[in-house]
Amino acid sequence: MSAAGTNQRLWGHAVVDIDEVISGAKRPERTLELCLRPDLAAKLEDVQRRYAEEKDRPRESLADGGNLGALADELKAIKAEAAEHTIVFRFRSLNHYRIQTLARDLPPRDGVPMDKRLGYNVDALTWNLFRECCYEPDLTDEQVERLIGPKDRVGDGVLSPSQWKRLDETLDAVNFAARDIPF
């Protein structure tokens, strides 16, 4: 063994300094992009459909460009509007001890079978996970409540059911999914 003793180990064919590897460790992160105007998706689909129909329409002459230019401009405008209402959330996982502490400090609600089965308030844990894991944008408690709902009614915010599902899956993935880099 080297002079560093137990601080170095053979990994493959290279000697790795364990202290250096631990010092450089980072918690898992995920991003989630949500457009808070999902109604624009239907508008976009409609214009895309009209664009495809216009593109496939038989032409009377080479000069007959039809409405493609106007429809392309409309598509661009809808995408720009959607971009103005889109937020990229960045999440960093909590450590195991912090999650256990949060769950322990959130007693199950009476009359909520899932809470009783798991031993903690599921909605409040999800709210706290969002609050503590989301590091960008930096949201206030009031903004979190408007977005995802209050602690006792998580999911009662402005997100659609499919957006809520994606958010819930992202929180689960960042905190509980195995995600090592495969070699």
Image (tube, rainbow, N blue to C red):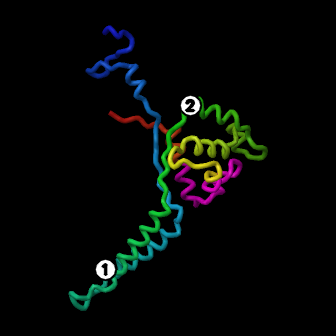
Q: Amino acid at mark 2?
A: His
The spot of residue 55 in percent (x, y) is 31, 80
The spot of residue 173 in percent (x, y) is 50, 43
Can residue 176 be spotted in the picture?
A: no
What residue sits right under mark 2 in the picture?
96
User: Which residue reaches farthest right?
Assistant: 110
Mark-to-mark CA distance, 2 and 1:
55 Å
Q: Does residue 116 lie above or below 34 as drawn?
A: above
Q: Quadrant of the C terminus?
A: top left
- Look at the image and give the residue range highlighted in magenta: 145-168
Q: Does residue 180 lie above or below 86 as drawn?
A: above
What residue sits right under mark 1 in the picture?
55
Q: Does residue 104 lie above or below 170 as drawn?
A: above
Dot 2 alpha-carbon crowd within 10 angstroms: few under 14, some 14 to 19, many 20 or more: few
Q: Quadrant of the N terminus?
A: top left
Judging from the image, what secondary structure is the residue with disc 1 in?
A: helix
Task: Say how many tags the image has.
Answer: 2
Can residue 55 be spotted in the picture?
A: yes
Task: Compare residues 74 and 56 and report the one nearer the observer.
Answer: 74
The spot of residue 121 in percent (x, y) is 70, 42
> Would you say residue 157 sits in the magenta stretch?
yes
The spot of residue 82 in percent (x, y) is 46, 66
Decide if residue 111 is on the left or right side of residue 59: right
> Would you say residue 8 sits in the magenta stretch?
no
Residue at image location 27% in from the left, 21% down from the top: 14
Decide if residue 28 is on the left or right side of residue 3: right
Residue at image location 48% in from the left, 60% down from the top: 86
Decide if residue 18 is on the left or right side of residue 63: right
Residue 67 placement: quadrant: bottom left
Q: Amino acid at mark 1?
A: Lys
Residue 164 placement: quadrant: bottom right
Disc number placed over residue 36 in the picture, else none: none
